[in-house]
Amino acid sequence: MTTRSARRIRRSLRATGAGVAALLALSGCSSESSGDAGSSSKPSGTITVFAAASLQESFAKLGKTFEKQHPGTEVTFNFGGSDTLAASITSGAPADVFAAASTRTMRTVTDQDATAGRPRTFVRNRLEIATLPGNPDEIDSLEDLTRPGLKVVLCDRTVPCGAAAQSALRTGGLRLTPVSYEEDVKSALTKVVLKEADAALVYRTDVRAAGDKVEGVEFPEAAEAVNDYPIALLKDAPNPGAAGAFIDLVKSAEGQKVLTAAGFLTP
Amino acid sequence: MPLLIPAAVGLAFLLLPLLALLVRAPWRSLPEQLTSPEVWQALRLSLVCATAATALSLLIGVPLAWLLARTDFPGRGLVRALVTLPLVLPPVVGGVALLLAFGRNGVIGQWLDAWFGITLPFTTTGVVLAETFVAMPFLVISVEGTLRAADPRYEEAAMTLGASRFTAFRRVTLPLIAPGVAAGSVLAWARALGEFGATITFAGNFPGRTQTMPLAVYLALQNDPAAAIALSLVLLAVSIAVLAGLRDRWMTAS
């Protein structure tokens, strides 16, 4: 109750002038980047992390690590499409941390003034071609995907993996008509796993997570289609102290080790 | 009247979200949102596919309803329960099941591909199949109920006068149950028009081929909520127009 009224006061303060808003943003930024609030007072309680679906495996692991390092804490996750998560955050979902799969998505949250401080890129992800096991269609390049008769699925351009696919194709000067624009990266991958499609453009991390159900093919144009993953503490975070400590863990060498093992690139 | 208050709450609960759609609609930019070719493409595909799914449901659903209502065979109760299964199944599960059956690598689909070179996922036919799977039970249940209520003695009389079973069905039974068939068709058509989960799972999403209005709404919501609201309004208007237009002619006739 007290935090809520404090928040309300902060809100009315913000309304009094842009100068106050800037000050608040600065203080939010410093407390997030230094991480003092997290380390000086011991983190405790529950933190809620909204994270892109592609982070599911590695963040679940990091959540367990965090709970072990800080007894008495509990990390709960809401994994989903970045844009869907951003929409629920800006409409008031009670979250502490947001990790998005693209800077564009994070911008929709910062535009609404919903983050405390500037989001930081903590990993990057690049595209890979997912083909059937053994690569029976002998796909070696992005251009091979444009071969007639090949069933290729892409993510819809409204979601981050689709936007990345479009810029990779632009870089290669290629025109590709897929059989479907899927609603997220996991459903694009599923169509290949079920052998309904011959290939899909997905993230490197998804290829790795699918194990031997698909085979990954790297291609040079992917270097122009890299997604930055930003993470940010949210302004209305119910548990900012512990949330800051979790962000520190994600950015630490230990966190980066877990993420690179899953196929992410360090920024 | 103690029932009046919960009844009013019930009505408000059903109508308020639809009102909210009207309140938040981007009225000023609506004309340009709705005149884009993508919208018309998706709307036309929606109407064509829902109509095709209803026709297919009539073709195979009415005989199925007749079988359930007029004949006696062991395990009929079980068959009847199985027919209603798609009504309660999450549509996305229906889509996965369709993929496993009719997909290129599916139980039946692999033979369709090997023998005829037909693959159904990612095609307009796939959309029609997905919609039929979800919508046909509405028609079957509706027609079966009407058949049970219709007096079978008219058919028996026709047959004693020399009509074959099929002629009796065509000339006597069908006209008798026409209002029930019509009501069932409208229900099935409306359900097919709103189908989302099975369609996006089984048929994918490609503008002009498999992207129906509900898919267009969902994907527009990802980055352009105003467009999503505009598309929703179109779907709402079409649904209301159809239900209102058909109600007077058919549903109250019975």
Image (cartoon, coloured by chain):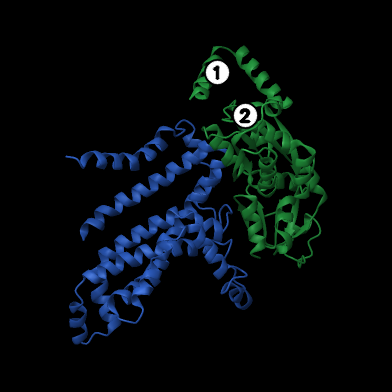
Residue located 66% across and 65% down the image: A195
Q: Is residue A201 left or right of residue B177?
A: right
Residue located 51% across and 45% down the image: B217
**Residue carrying label 2:** A240
Give the drawing colour for chain A: green
Given this view, does label 2 or label 1 mark the residue nearer the observer? Answer: 2
Residue A211 found in image quarter: bottom right
Give the drawing colour for chain B: blue
**Nearer to the camera, A232 or B194:** A232
Residue A10 shows which numbered tag? 1
**Nearer to the camera, B74 or B54:** B74
Chain under callout 1: A
Measure the alpha-carbon separation of dots 2 and 1: 15 Å
Quick one: quadrant of the C terminus of chain B? bottom left
Q: From what the image shows, is residue A197 above or below residue A38?
A: below
Q: From what the image shows, is residue A167 above or below residue B128?
A: above
Quick one: quadrant of the N terminus of chain B? top left
Q: Earlier in the sequence, mark 2 or mark 1?
A: 1
Residue type pointed to by label 2: Pro
| Residue B64, x across and y down, in percent | 36, 74
- Label 2 Cα crowd, 10 Å radius (few <14 / some 14-19 / many 20+): many
Label 2: element kind: helix
Chain under callout 2: A
Residue located 25% across and 56% down the image: B249
- Label 1 Cα crowd, 10 Å radius (few <14 / some 14-19 / many 20+): some
Q: Is residue A46 left or right of residue B144?
A: right
Q: Are marks 2 and 1 in contact (CB under 8 Å)?
A: no
Q: Is any part of residue A244 visible from this angle? A: yes
Label 1: element kind: helix
| Residue A139, x across and y down, in percent | 78, 61
Residue A37 shows which numbered tag? none
| Residue B133, x across and y down, in percent | 45, 64
